[in-house]
Amino acid sequence: MHKRSESLVLRTLLGSNWHVFILLLTLTSCQAQTLSNCRPTPPMPPNVKPGVDDLSLGRDGKTLVVPGGDGKIRFVDMTTGEVRKILTGHTNAIYKAVFSPDEKLVASSSRDRTARIWDVSTAERSRN
């Protein structure tokens, strides 16, 4: 009964926009990634499959950024499913890859203990 009353209070306060609140909460929350100085990051196994830990959608709603477990970032066209571009450079699984607000850059973090900024137009690591 207690959970039901909490839900009713949230719906009353947020009205029909409760799903927007949950989305904003999800987008603004951060996940801590801890690194241990005791052991080095294990190497990526040979012939690793490109598993997916995260997805990021461009503002146009047509481009999906897919950071892979194989150390590659793929740009997928949502209408055709075609991989339009692949960014390579990380040496281990990629945790997250997100567009900058102007969508000219992509930021990524990896198990290889690096964070990188990529230029989307050239598909290369940004020198800025």
Image (cartoon, rainbow, N blue to C red):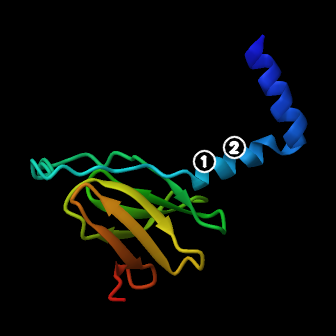
Label 1: state its secondary structure: helix
Left or right of residue 39, residue 97 in this image: right
Residue 18, image x, y percentages: 80, 41
Mark 1, residue position? 26
Crowding at dot 2, Cα within 10 Å, few <14 / some 14-19 / many 20+, comes out as: few
Left or right of residue 26, residue 109 in this image: left
Labels 1 and 2 touching (C-beta < 8 A): yes
Q: Quadrant of residue 71?
A: bottom left
- 115 or 2: nearer the eye? 2
Name which residue type carries label 2.
Answer: Ile
Mark 2, residue position? 22
- 71 or 128: nearer the eye? 128
Label 2: state its secondary structure: helix
Residue 79, image x, y percentages: 61, 59
How far apart, in angstroms, are the residues tagged by discs 1 and 2?
6 Å
The correct choice, above or below, for 116 with respect to 20 in the image is below
Left or right of residue 10, residue 32 in this image: left
Q: Which label belongs to residue 76?
A: none
Q: Which residue appears at 39% of the width and 47% of the height? A: 52
Q: Which residue appears at 68% of the width and 48% of the height? A: 23
Name which residue type carries label 1.
Answer: Thr
- 13 or 104: nearer the eye? 13
Residue 12, image x, y percentages: 90, 34
Q: Quadrant of residue 7?
A: top right
- 41 or 57: nearer the eye? 41
